Image (cartoon, rainbow, N blue to C red):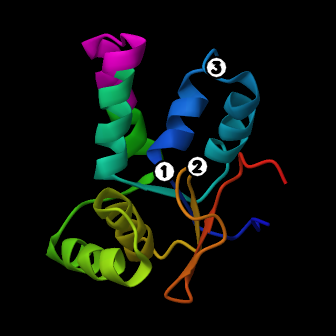
Amino acid sequence: MIGEDDKVFVDSNVWLYAFVERQDPAKHEIAQQLTLRPNLAISDQVVREVCRNLLRKEQYTEDEIIRTIRSFYANYEVVRANVEIDVDASRLHQAYSLSYWDSLIVAAALAANASILISEDMHDGLVVDSKLTIMNRFQVR
């Protein structure tokens, strides 16, 4: 369960469901609710992955991408890559058997002091460093 005061880091796949309804209307609704809550964090990697997919798969215009980028930076805490995150990602990759790209997301979530990471394609329920719980809110329970 996500509490009102929890800082939540939102992965790229959740944002894509929030932006694109026709892909999966049920997931779109869940993603919309998640991305409207306060106290969200993302990383510059998430911004880039979302924009790449919106350009490639949804034919967003450059003006739409620019507005999306500006909106991300204006409305959410955006964790920027740095040496500490990259080194921590390497540790997490080894310690938790995460893919390299997922380990970068997890390292950014930890750097943001998030207590929850919402992602569809990581290990649901995994607790990382006794600080961060990965949740898949799209999984049928």
Q: Secondary structure at mark 1?
A: loop
Kindly identify the residue that appears in the image at 29 percent across and 24 percent down.
66
> Which residue is at the far front?
97
Of labels 3 and 2, earlier in sequence is 3
Q: Which one is in front in this view, the residue at disc 3 or the one at disc 2?
A: 2
User: Looking at the magenta stretch, what is its main secondary structure?
Assistant: helix
The label on residue 61 is none
The verdict on residue 67 being magenta is yes
Q: Is residue 133 magenta?
A: no
**Residue 109 vs residue 37, the one in the foreground:** 109
Magenta span: 55-68
Image spot of residue 98 (x, y percent): 40, 68
Dot 2 surroundings within 10 Å: few (below 14), some, or many (20 or more)? some
What residue is shown with label 2? Answer: 120
Q: Is residue 129 above or below residue 7?
A: below
Task: Identify residue for label 1.
Answer: 11
Distance from the alpha carbon under mark 3 to that under mark 1: 17 Å
What residue do we see at 17% from left, 69% from top?
A: 82
Residue lying farthest right? 141
